Image: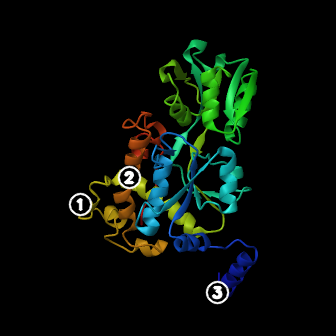
Amino acid sequence: MNGSKTLTLASLLLAAGIAHAGATLDAIKKNGFIKCGVSDGLPGFSFADEKGNYNGIDVDICRGVAAAVFGDSTKLKFTPLTAKERLTALQSGEIDVLSRNTTWTSSRDSAQGMNFTGVTYYDGQGFLVNKKLGVASAKNLDGATVCVQAGTTTELNLSDYFRSSKMKFTPITYDKSDESAKSLEAGRCDVLTSDQSQLYAQRIKLAKPDDYVVLPEVISKEPLGPVVRHGDDDWFDIVKWTLYVMVNAEELGVNSKNVEEMKKSANPDVKRLLGVEGDKGKDFGLANDWMATVIKQVGNYGEIFERNVGKGSPLKIERGLNALWNQGGLQYAPPVR
């Protein structure tokens, strides 16, 4: 394609309102912080302690992005959002990035004007029941009353599963995940359905968590990840590659404790990742060592998984699908090259 045609195409894209690269990132730099939308209280993913400090795997993604942009993982403003509120908050510009256990779907990625930047956690929908119900399989839930959170992909999955299994159910919807869990505990429903990770998180908040069990069936694919609005490729690239940096770092054996020592590595992939070789900062409009800063201040993917939802956390979830690709899982990042 010659130069004149390239300019014509660029003009057409601008006229159509497609190219707005840089607007979000410019506003973020002007504000001096990133507006991050998180859940309204989900242990392991985004949860505020008694001092109001947020923790969780979704929170750590935002911390990583702040470290990338500002060199400081604390340059954040967290906005807790319900499932109903989250997409509107992103669309309206109330937040810059949504990092809130949100499932990547075709409609959200297209008609609703959003870009998913990767998969932080590969999940699937399941069922939580009280052991006294005497149910060992979701196939035994015919006629059950089911608590489900409104404004989620969970509602459609639930309906599809029961219809395809030729079973009946009565749904009870709630705006907040805590409300649906309390209803299960109070006996207002027989079963609570949500992403399995959320079920484990809600289970530990119950008065007697050992009285409840997550059934073995997984009835859907729920790839959860950060989301940005359409229209700003610069911002999209930074959020996307912050996650990829964390995954690549784990694969290369670089973590928050050894990052400085690893700068001496002879491995070219490590050198590029840590800004010792090449000019990868310029590609993103960031400091050349921004990837090293992310790892040092927040950690690699394995670190954020283990401390928030893995064996080092109260949830004690196995890596499973979230293990690296070369360890039997699905976590795989493009190379820094």
Location of residue 274 in the rendering, given as x and y in whole percent from the top left corner: 34, 65
Of residues 34 and 248, the one nearer the viewer is 34
Of residues 58 and 13, the one nearer the viewer is 58
Circles 3 and 1, Cβ within 8 Å, touching? The answer is no
Q: Earlier in the sequence, mark 3 or mark 1?
A: 3
Location of residue 26 in the rendering, given as x and y in whole percent from the top left corner: 56, 74
Residue 334 appears in view: no
Q: Which quadrant is home to the N terminus?
A: bottom right
Residue beneath disc 1: 261
* Front disc: 3 or 1: 1
Which residue does the image show at 71% across and 56% down from the upper left? 110
Position of 123 compared to 295: left or right? right
Position of 21 compared to 142: left or right? left
Residue 182: which quarter of the image? Answer: top right
Q: How is the image coloured?
A: rainbow
Q: Residue 32's mark?
A: none
Of residues 45 and 266, the one nearer the viewer is 45
Q: Which quadrant is home to the C terminus?
A: bottom left
Q: Earlier in the sequence, mark 2 or mark 3?
A: 3
Residue beneath disc 2: 300
Of residues 332 and 62, the one nearer the viewer is 62
Residue beneath disc 3: 3
Under mark 2, the amino acid is Asn
Location of residue 95 in the rendering, given as x and y in whole percent from the top left corner: 61, 60
Circles 1 and 2, Cβ within 8 Å, touching? The answer is no
User: In the displayed structure, would residue 196 be above or below residue 70?
Assistant: above
Element under disc 3: helix
